[in-house]
Amino acid sequence: MTPILAQTSWLIPLYPLLGALLTIPWSPAFVTRTGPRPAGYINIVMTTLALLHSLLAFLAFWGKSSPQFFFAPWLNVAGLDLTIPLEASAITLGACVLITTLNLLAQVYAVGYLEMDWGWGRFFAMMALFEAGLCALVLCNSLLFSYMLLEILTLGTYLLVGFWYNQSLVVTGARDAFLTKRVGDLVLLMAVLAIYPLTHTWDFRELAAWAQTANVEPGLMTLIGIGLVAGPMSKCAQFPLHLWLDEAMEGPLPSTILRNAVVVTTGVWILVKLEPVIALSSTASAFAIAVGTVTSIGATLIAAAQIDIKRVLSYLSSAYMGLMFIAVGAHQPGTALLLALVYALGMATLVMGAGSVIINVTTQDLTQMGGLGSRRPITATAIMAGAAGLVALPPLGGFWAMLSLVSGLWEAQRGLLVAIVLLVNWLVAFTLARMVGLIFAGQTQQMTTRSPEPIWLMVLPMAIAAGFTLHLPLVMAQLNLLPAWAEVSQDMALLLTWSSILGAAVGTLLYVNRMVENPAGLIKKPLQNLLAYDFYTPKLYRNTFVLGVDVLSRMTDWLDRYVVDGLVNAVGLASLFSGETLKYGNTGQLQFYVLTIALGIAGLGVLMNWSALTALF
Amino acid sequence: MLTPLLLIPLIGAIALSCWPGLSASQARSGALIASSAALLWTIALFTQFDLAFSGFQFHEFLPWLPALGLNYELSLDGLSLLMVALNSLITWIAIWSSDPEIERPRLFYSLLLVVSAGVAGAFVAQNLMLFFLLYEMELVPLYLLIAIWGGEKKAYAATKFLLYTALSGALMLAGFLGTVWLSGAEDFTYHAVMGQDLPMVWQGILLGLLLVAFGIKIPLVPFHTWLPDTYVAASTPVAMMLGGVLAKLGTYGLLRFGLGMFPDAWAQFSPYLAGWAAVSVLYGAVTAIAQKDIKRMVAYSSIGHMGYVLLGAAAMTDLSLTGAVSQMVSHGLILTILFHLVGVIETKVGTRKLDVLNGLMNPVRGLPMVSALLVLGGMASAGIPGLVGFVTEFLVFQGSYAVYPVQTLLGVIGTGLTTVYFVILLNRTCFGRLDNATAYFPKVTFSEKLPAYILAGLILFLGIQPNWLVQWGASTASAMVAAIPIVAIEVAADEAIQGITDDVQLNDAIAFPIATLPTLP
């Protein structure tokens, strides 16, 4: 049984794809009698199948070193032979398990959260499309096909964020998400095109092998490396391409679970696969580290200043992605993947908890919440579990991933980066403590006095995700992902723990015990605004790219209308005008016409016999 | 084998115009029968086509005016085959999506069929003069189609179209005459590389003439200003024919006569051509962003996408030329579905203005299926993978990057700008809030959506199984490249790849079955 499942692991992305296709009858025009719900149930079943399959295949592969490859022909023309290579190994199938699990939880959650929505068919089809795309991406072993899948997911983001398309904020959010991600995709495409003449392959393993012996002109390699890093930058919402993730929060919350937990990490996955190539150029690695550093510090600072619960989480996502960028730039791809795993579970729990708060409080504004601790014990536990799993708090998952990152950096003698990671961790702990404090501690307010736990369809997935987060260290121990205690750098472990505890303590003192009347007042107003308004990035966009393209397009249009076409019309007008003018030269006198004709003939005669005439004289 | 391609639509046209007292729907059925017959005949051609042979097939010869060197000579290679197929398909779709209540139906359908016959003939003509005659033959019917059944500013647009195309025809004639006289050929029969022995200056001048002639038809910036006016003024079926098929006469001519007859001069010009292509792509895309009328937007997008064909042709590699040929087909399919959907929106909603349209995705009162298809069409045009537009653009890029990296990267930026205007279009038309007070649109019937379903199916299918599209033109493209004297750029082979010792047991690899094209007889 299991070997068959392992050999057919290329089927995993096809289950959700089939589920997405099966929802077609419920898209508006066809089946109306049943309502849209069967579409959701079908997709949940298909996701469960995909989960079971990937889990069994994963167990079959676990402990074996050799991965298995599958090839499907795609395009073979004019010397270009493209086959789709899929790699089934413990790591890729493990990622499939994570994706399908989270999607199953998110879909069940959506049944509760979107209970009254009429767009189920579309929603579940898009979720299934995402699941299929993500599973295909992790199984895919080729840069080109990974790029293609990323593009398809970009389109999926547009449609999923634009799910409630009749609200103007949703429409702009969907637009910005699509365009920002597309910019990154196209930069990646440029790098994909540019790398082929050097390597003659897009296969990740062959690229890695090539990178070991490659001898490329440094300038070109730097450009390609930066292109390869810049592509995932937009996926991972790194500065300055981070705004879309914040705006994408306008989409339905169950999709945010999947997006913030795993979709954003697709970029990191590609980076991890490409790490050997990026490492060829020290500038590109430094670029990745710089981007990651700026993002992780900037985004955590912004997150600490937000009063919208979804925004807090969205900027924390950017920050964690930044840490993964640092890991890749510092040549620790394994750590980046570990961090992605820990982050996915923690963030999924936090987003589910946030949704559970929002749906019965009917506001996302943290300043209007408070005192929910007594009314929402399960949600409070889940959010705190998610937060604890995310920051470096032993013995939970986040601690081990961060520890691996920090000790790696320390061994590579990058003390500054260690300090940065500690700072980011401190800020994350503070931000999460602030969020927890604002929601659950203090006095109840108008919005929170009557706010019970939501329907079990939401509570159950949330609790399960929290359970996974808490048990992650045990799973990691099973999978030998934890370092032996002897190898652990105890200084680093202590530093990390202290930074988390300190951050959480400051947050707790300020927002749970409310030591200070108005903690925000501790910071100067301009700085506060700078952080609250996201470093004024929307303004920056409006005044640079958007303005540029807008002005350029208007100018070209003007040029097209009045200069290029104007010239043509002028020629037309001139001929019309000259004809109209000439007609007044017609007098009707025969002699005049004869004279004209005679002169013309004479002129022609001279012209044609010019050579003879010149010979005469 | 080839004469029926001209004859079937022509007989249909004559029959329709001579049959007295036909009602509109009867005339439509008659035209559909004729175009279906032509389409079936095209499919039969595909089954008979020999993929392994890269030259011309199905040769037909009939002396006509031997004294002038004008003979009725037809034959077909991979490039022609794809173009003929596009023509037959889009003619059928244009007739299907014509308004069933159209005025003067007999004249309309017979003109449309005459155009189709002329274009089909031009694609298979093996004689320069015959190509010229058939090229000119579609001119007057199209003028009438625009001038009689067009929309706003139809007279202006039709005249502009007529003048431009007549100029294009005149330049082309000059180029053909010059080629034949200077090369001392006995008649106007087309031979590959027939201009090769001429002095370089003459080659350059003649190629220049043809470039401008076909540049008007494609159109390339700055000869494009007839296009937005004409496409917008033309009714939906005529716009489909113009954008989907007629524009391909230009690129076909460029490949067949420009590249085919003067490969030397072409190779000399190619850096400038690639630059010109990049300018066209960017210009079309940037101008489209500023448009407020969705039909005009689609028209400008056409300018941008034709630039990729020139880019592929300029790079002169096997891959880029195959990409260029395939891009012609994919552009035809995508533009046709976009024009069709825009036409449906215009008839149902009554406007094409971006500022007025809103919320058509609404499942109850909007046009949900049309919106969904519009998303598909727009994304195909923007080059999202999984749809046919990506495959062809990618082939062009992949083929041309090694030769003209800068121009290729500019082309990639062009696809980004394409996304910008399609997002604007989709956000304004499909997304947003539908005004309940005005939203009383007539239902879109299945028959009105059928052309879009067919095209969407093709776009999706060819995007997932691109072999079905690209293989037809591949051998012809290779033959054309082989005729070019110097191979453009030698990519330094990398020994590192060969030396990889893979630690994977290869017998682990399992090829799993995926539908592939059966080898043709």
Image (cartoon, coloured by chain):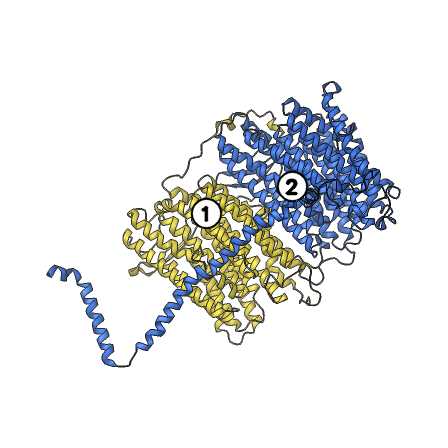
Chain colours: A blue, B yellow
Residue A110 as seen in the image, left or right of residue A174? right
Residue B71 vs residue A92, the one in the foreground: A92
- Amino acid type, label 1: Leu
Give the residue pinned by disc 1. B311
Mark 1 in CB contact with mark 2 (< 8 angstroms): no
Q: Height in image: A450 above or below A563?
A: above
Quarter location, residue B68:
bottom left
Identify which residue is drawn at 73% across, 52% down: A121
Q: Chain of mark 2?
A: A
Q: Is residue A351 above or below residue B370?
A: above
State the SS at label 2: loop
Q: Nearer the viewer, residue B392 or A266?
A: A266
Which of the pair A547/A43 is nearer the observer? A547
Q: Disc 2 designates what residue?
A: A237
> Could you tell me which quadrant the N terminus of chain B lies in?
bottom left
Task: For residue B2, say whether it is visible.
Answer: no
| Image disc number at residue A365 | none
Q: Chain of mark 1?
A: B
Determine the secondary structure under disc 1.
Answer: helix
- Describe residue A67's horizontal placement relative to residue B408 as left or right: right
Image coordinates for residue B431, horizontal then vertical, percent: 66, 57
- Classify mark 1: residues with Cα within 10 Å, few (<14), some (14-19) or many (20+): many
Q: Please identify, in this view, whether the residue under mark 1 or under mark 2 is nearer the observer.
A: 2
Are callouts 1 and 2 both on one chain? no
Quarter of the image holding residue A587? bottom left
Depth check, front residue: B128 or A134: A134
> Could you tell me residue B185's position as x and y percent?
29, 53
